[in-house]
Amino acid sequence: MLADPFYYLNNFRTVLASLQSRYWELLTVEEREFIHQFALLPEPSCALLVRMIMRRGMFFRLSRLEYPEIGDATAAAAPLLEVGCLEEPLLDVEALHRLLTKAELAGNLALSRDACRLSKPDLLEVLRAQHAEQRPLHGWCPRLADRAFRPAVKPLAERFRLMFFGNFHQDWTAFVLSDLGISSYETVPVHTAPFRTRAQIEAFYGLYRCQAALEGGVDLKEVAAGIPAPIFDSDWLEEHRQRLLFHIAIAYERSGDSASALAVHSVCRYRGSRMRRVRLLERMKEWPAARELCLVAASSPESEAERQLVRRVVQRLNRKLGVADEKKTESPYVATFDIQLEALPNGRALEFQVRDYLASQEGEQCSVHYVENALINSLFGLLCWDAIFAPISGAFFHDFQYGPADLESPYFYQRRRDRFAQCFAELESGRYKDIIRRRLIEKVGIQAPFVAWGLLKQSLLECALHCFPATHLRLWFEWIVRDVVENRTGFPDLVQFWPNERRYRMVEIKGPGDRLQDNQRRFLEFCSRHGMPVAVSRVRWGEGAASSRLCSGQR
């Protein structure tokens, strides 16, 4: 429990103070007036308003606004009604249905016996058919000793939330989780304002409305029409805009409207959009146009993932168009080995079965761990902590950030190239082990990209530092920063350590009928190209497992 009963009010005041110091010249008259007016209201009134702002919904019954620290809600509401922050609204039957219990609806609306037998959700359809009008609460329920309020400033408060956090997903709970110690964040000494002009604020709010409309199932043409114009003076805002265009195009694809999807993809620069255009053109049998776009992508690929996909798609289009393929470049050899297991998983992950099998085969001189993407990413995140959390412009906007705002931007590594070079130099000097050990202790539990605190036990860390050569760590870390979005995944499931021999092997597990994903294949080939010990284990079931499957009726 939090010691201060007005914690939520203090958090809201923190947001207002931040906006006032950062954006006073950019705020509208309405926004400035609210900040000024809020400071003059009695504390119980401020607290009641913030309670309603932070709760879901737009309509609230006075009888359900009971908070010990506020006291008399009627008295607290009076100043808010006087200045227009609260209203006693007209309610349609949908709002009334949300506010009242089924028994209250039946008692106040003189429902028929058949209507009273319906469930509350089904009752709403009956009420919609009978009542199209709007009334105040006492107009619907004259015998009900209660009042309904609507916080008229709630949309304004929502705008303040967006301006403070600079993203769509964080809300007021970020303060509470931090105050309770559930979530902790790195302290970055310098924050920059997300917005430099009022036009940027309005563009961001417009993107938020479009995102909400898309998620709410609004007609896609209406959503697309609401997209703001290109934002040339803010990279991160334009990245938001491009991502939203991509999601609209995907929604068109899912709806079967290929022409509209193609039109949106054609003006979208978000990663993956170009190859979606290729796929759409191929589906529409526009093979020459699809191949031409593939060749453009091949000459300047946006990522290793696109380069890999282009090679595969061009071969397919060449066959359709009767064009001779260029000579293939041989892929690096990746070792494989088979494992036969006699027992079915029975709900247990296959990776854990193989881990235990390999451990039993190797004996005490070898330890086997299920790590997938977590181990190498964690080592990278700990060594490069200062580069990731560098206080550069446009990266950190407030005290509740999991990582820099531009983490998935194409510019993430470019903006920190010198800082990452300093981190990688520690691999050459040999100081990297002490740095990683120290960070594990100093930073444990802090929200951070790349680091998986739950996996990174001291024993596993020491095995990794002992058995992974510094040259291999550098290659992996450079691989990650080359493309953070694509290259932080695809690492093998298991790692084997032989501490006495200071060696390791990473193993990707594939069950019957399973195959390597593109990002896994890229990483394995990268490792093989550099002489790193990686392998793919293909699991098959023995006769015991087959008999068990038949006995249990599995096919």
Image (cartoon, rainbow, N blue to C red):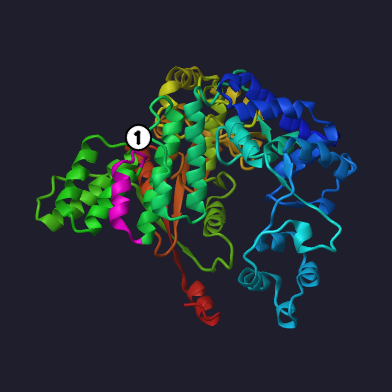
Quadrant assignment, res 403: top right
Left or right: where 152 falls relative to 251: right
Tally of numbered discs: 1
How far across and how far down the image is residue 256, in percent? 34, 61
The reply to whether residue 130 is visible in this rendering is: yes
Amino acid type at image mark 1: His
Q: Which quadrant holds the N terminus?
A: top right
| Residue at image location 71% in from the left, 35% down from the top | 175
Left or right: where 148 falls relative to 297: right
| Residue at image location 82% in from the left, 62% down from the top | 142
- SS at badge 1: loop
How far across and how far down the image is residue 192, in percent? 56, 21
Q: Which residue is mark 1?
A: 530
The reply to whether residue 332 is visible in this rendering is: no
Would you call the spot at circle 1 few (<14 residues within 10 Å), some (14-19), or many (20 or more)? Answer: few
Q: Nearer the viewer, residue 47 or 61?
A: 61
Magenta range: 256-271
Query: Within the magenta stretch, is there residue 257?
Result: yes
Q: Nearer the viewer, residue 329 or 212?
A: 212
| Residue at image location 51% in from the left, 41% down from the top | 208
Left or right: where 3 falls relative to 489: right
How far across and how far down the image is residue 26, in percent? 55, 23
How far across and how far down the image is residue 521, in percent? 36, 47
Up-down: is 198 above or below 497?
above
Left or right: where 59 falls relative to 43: left
Query: Within the magenta stretch, is there residue 54?
Result: no
Up-down: is 426 above or below 108?
above
Quadrant assignment, res 228: top left
